């Protein structure tokens, strides 16, 4: 079910809808991922080309994972979140749309979809992501040297468990 929020930018409250992605959204979702990754992680070397990323979203992520998007009024995709079982495996926002509550809504949605708990990985260099997830009750439980990810970038695993 789509959910709405007002865009808090003083521009008249244009709506943003969260909804499940469909096949036709794959390219737009991948492009948000690409823009966000480039802006948030400029020092992290991506092992795959932009076209490889788009193919991955089209052939794997959108058809096989619970993929959600944030869509601004007028149809532009401004965010993506991917769930796979109890893992929040992707949460990326278009850089121009950060700080507007969309990430908060995605996390609330993920917690609602996985009320028994969530886990996620983020890169150690991504300090804003650490603050964001910790603000939402996630706890860092494992730090690695990056040998287990494609980027070979040190990462950290976060876990959220519901409070009794």
Image (cartoon, rainbow, N blue to C red):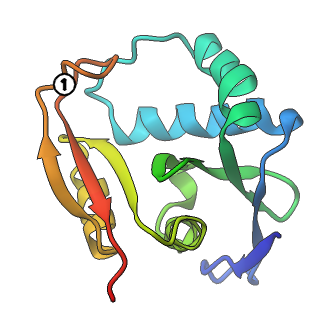
Q: Position of residue 161 (x, y in %)?
A: 33, 71
Q: Residue at x 29, y 25 (%)?
A: 44
Tally of numbered tags: 1
Q: Nearer the viewer, residue 164 or 65?
A: 164
Q: Is residue 28 left or right of residue 135?
A: right
- In this rendering, is residue 18 above or below 146? below
SS type, badge 1? loop
Q: Position of residue 49 (x, y in %)?
A: 53, 10
Q: Is residue 38 left or right of residue 44?
A: right
Q: Quadrant of the C terminus?
A: bottom left
Q: Residue at x 67, y 21 (%)?
A: 54
Q: Residues within 10 Å of mark 1 (few under 14, many from 20)?
A: some
Q: Which residue is mark 1?
A: 146
Q: Position of residue 100 (x, y in %)?
A: 54, 72
Q: Quadrant of residue 133?
A: bottom left
Q: Nearer the viewer, residue 96 or 1?
A: 1
Q: Quadrant of residue 19?
A: bottom right
- In this rendering, is residue 140 above or below 67? below
Q: Residue at x 13, y 33 (%)?
A: 144
Q: Quadrant of the N terminus?
A: bottom right
Q: Is residue 115 left or right of residue 142?
A: right
Q: Residue at x 31, y 55 (%)?
A: 129
Q: Quadrant of residue 96?
A: bottom right
- In this rendering, is residue 91 above or below 49? below
Q: Position of residue 136 (x, y in %)?
A: 35, 74
């Amino acid at each position: 079910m789509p959910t709405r929020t007002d865009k808090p930018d003083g521009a008249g409250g244009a709506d943003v809808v969260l909804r499940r992605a469909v096949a036709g959204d794959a390219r737009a979702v991948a492009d948000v991922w690409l823009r966000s990754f480039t802006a948030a992680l400029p020092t992290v070397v991506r092992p795959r080309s932009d076209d490889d990323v788009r193919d991955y979203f089209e052939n794997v992520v959108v058809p096989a994972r619970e993929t959600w998007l944030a869509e601004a009024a007028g149809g532009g995709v401004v965010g993506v979140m991917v769930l796979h079982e109890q893992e929040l495996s992707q949460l990326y926002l278009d850089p121009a749309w950060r700080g507007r509550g969309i990430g908060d809504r995605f996390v609330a949605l993920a917690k609602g979809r996985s009320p028994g708990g969530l886990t996620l990985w983020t890169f150690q260099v991504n300090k804003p992501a650490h603050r964001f997830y910790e603000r939402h009750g996630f706890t860092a439980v494992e730090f690695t040297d990056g040998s287990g990810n494609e980027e070979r970038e040190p990462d950290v695993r976060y876990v959220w468990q519901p409070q009794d």
